[in-house]
Image (cartoon, rainbow, N blue to C red):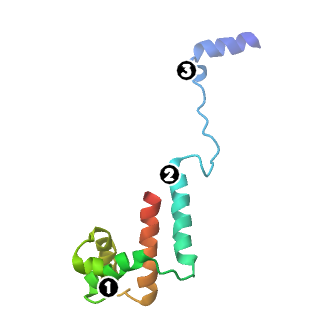
Amino acid sequence: VDIAADKYRIENPNLFDREEKRTPKSNLFSSSKRVFVLCLAIRMANSLLVQTYFNPDEHWQTLEVAHRIAFGYGHLTWEWKKGIRSYLHPMLFSLLYKVLAQLHLDTPWFMMKAPRLLQSILSAVG
């Protein structure tokens, strides 16, 4: 029996020279892409599920300014009136507000949740 097996190996060397490549069993954390998707999903769920109200300074320095840029009204703090703040970050949210308005999704719910979702995506990418 061993002679027949050896003869078969000699006649078919390619079948025995290469090892079978085995893929590891799927693991949720086996790649950085999966970790990113998990973090993104958690951040997005968190942004939609948190129901507490917190009015940080960033609200007045970003969302209120973005609303004013997009719709022409809203409160500006003295930093904006004096011109010592950059419009780069609020412009991201202003663009989001404009897109929501164009899609007729500028309802209070979307206007409140969409910036949170956008920020969760930016945070996950960062």
- Mark 1 = which residue? 101
Disc 2 target residue? 33
Crowd band around label 1 with a 10 angstrom C-alpha radius: few (<14), some (14–19), many (20+): some
Residue 73, labelled with which disc?
A: none
Q: Is residue 63 left or right of residue 109?
A: left
In the image, what residue occupies the spot 55% across and 20% down? 14
The disc labelled 3 sits on which kind of residue?
A: Asn
Q: What amino acid type should be assigned to the residue bearing mark 2?
A: Lys
Decide if residue 21 is on the left or right side of residue 90: right
How far across and down, in percent of the image, does residue 80 sit?
Answer: 27, 78
> In the rendered view, would you say 92 is above or below 110?
above
For mark 2, give the secondary structure: helix
Residue shown at the point (41%, 89%) measured from the top left: 107
Q: Which residue is mark 3?
A: 14
Number of the front mark, 3 or 1: 1
Q: Nearer the viewer, residue 6 or 92?
A: 92
Circle 3 Cα neighbour tier, 10 Å, few/some/many (<14 / 14–19 / ≥20): few
Q: Do residues under tags 2 and 3 come within 8 Å of each other at their CB atoms? A: no
Q: Amino acid at mark 1?
A: Ala
